[in-house]
Image (cartoon, rainbow, N blue to C red):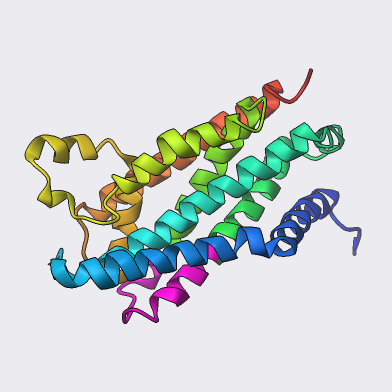
């Protein structure tokens, strides 16, 4: 019986362990700030403003915004971890050590994505725990809840990778989160139901991919959604396939990696 360790598996584990240790080593920067930020959201929007709003989508306002705030934290932290970690490796020129190894591109990408997903899910779990101090949560469908948040975390990890590939300086890794990611997240139904919007803006909102992710997660938690859960999965899986294909193609071509 061959007991020789699989070098590909060892390489994948090594990247994941490095990423996880990095996240935990600087936990004061990676895990604490999102918890504080989301606590303020719960207090201001959910507790203070929510009492005046009453219900939204058949739920009390605090319960309505919890899935959106959890997803917002997962999205921003998955994306932020990948773009900062991979660009840091490029900037310090130690990414070349991985690229010259016999590891396949898919394994290298999977290692970094796993690390980013770990941070995204960790922060999501922390925010969910914080939410329990403000409202009662009862998961409607655990499978949908877990699968949506996992797929979304992978998607934005891949998006962060693409940003890191094209970034040439640290300022470049802040452009997408500031001018694209944040506006799309806030306009993705975190704080409101799109049924409150005029017909024209409802149709415009359908082009926002965040809307499908947030509503899919809300359906998993509460059983209510502005959109069909089947449509949400279709859009999410479509984005996953496209971003994974682009990421692997960029690595194969060495775009932004080889000089």
Residue 94, position in %: x, y? Answer: 84, 37
Residue under the point 67% across and 64% down: 27
Specify whether residue 216 is painted magenta.
no
Count of marks placed on residues: 0
Residue 253, position in %: x, y? Answer: 68, 21
In the foreground, 92 or 120: 92
Residue under the point 53% across and 38% down: 159
Q: Is residue 92 left or right of residue 87?
A: right
Quarter of the picture containing the N terminus is bottom right
- Please identify the quarter of the rendering in which residue 115 is found: bottom right
In the foreground, 45 or 160: 45
Tell me which segment is drawn in magenta.
123-146
Q: Is residue 63 visible?
A: no
In the foreground, 44 or 31: 44
Quarter of the picture containing the C terminus is top right
Q: Which residue is at the far top?
A: 259
Q: Is residue 193 left or right of residue 257?
A: left
Q: Does 1 sit above or below residue 116?
A: below
Q: Is residue 232 left or right of residue 115?
A: left
Residue 81, position in %: x, y? Answer: 62, 49
Residue 167, position in %: x, y? Answer: 63, 27
Specify whether residue 137 is painted magenta.
yes
In the foreground, 62 or 209: 62
Q: Does 67 sit above or below residue 142?
A: above
Q: Is residue 199 visible?
A: yes
Residue under the point 64% across and 29% down: 165
Q: Is residue 196 left or right of residue 158?
A: left
Q: Does 154 sit above or below residue 243?
A: below
Q: Which residue is at the far left?
A: 199
């Amino acid at each position: 019986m061959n007991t020789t360790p699989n070098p590909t598996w060892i390489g994948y584990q090594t990247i994941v362990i490095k990423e996880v240790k990095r996240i935990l080593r600087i936990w004061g920067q990676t895990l604490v700030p999102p918890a504080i930020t989301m606590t303020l959201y719960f207090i201001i929007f959910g507790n203070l403003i929510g009492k005046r709003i009453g219900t939204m989508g058949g739920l009390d306002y605090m319960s309505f915004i919890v899935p959106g705030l959890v997803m917002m934290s997962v999205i921003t932290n998955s994306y932020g971890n990948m773009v900062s970690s991979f660009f840091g490796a490029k900037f310090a020129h130690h990414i070349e050590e991985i690229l010259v190894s016999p590891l396949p591109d898919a394994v290298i990408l999977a290692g970094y994505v796993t690390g980013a997903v770990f941070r995204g899910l960790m922060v999501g779990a922390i925010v969910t725990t914080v939410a329990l101090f403000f409202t009662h949560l009862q998961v409607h469908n655990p499978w949908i809840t877990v699968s949506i948040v996992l797929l979304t975390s992978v998607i934005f990890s891949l998006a962060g990778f693409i940003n890191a590939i094209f970034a040439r300086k640290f300022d470049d890794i802040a452009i997408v989160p500031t001018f694209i990611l944040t506006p799309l997240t806030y306009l993705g139904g975190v704080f409101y139901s799109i049924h409150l919007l005029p017909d024209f803006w409802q149709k415009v909102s359908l082009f926002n991919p965040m809307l499908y992710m947030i509503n899919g997660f809300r359906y998993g938690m509460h059983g209510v959604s502005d959109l069909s859960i089947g449509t949400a999965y279709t859009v999410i899986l479509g984005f996953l396939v496209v971003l994974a294909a682009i990421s692997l193609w960029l690595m194969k071509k060495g775009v932004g990696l080889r000089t």
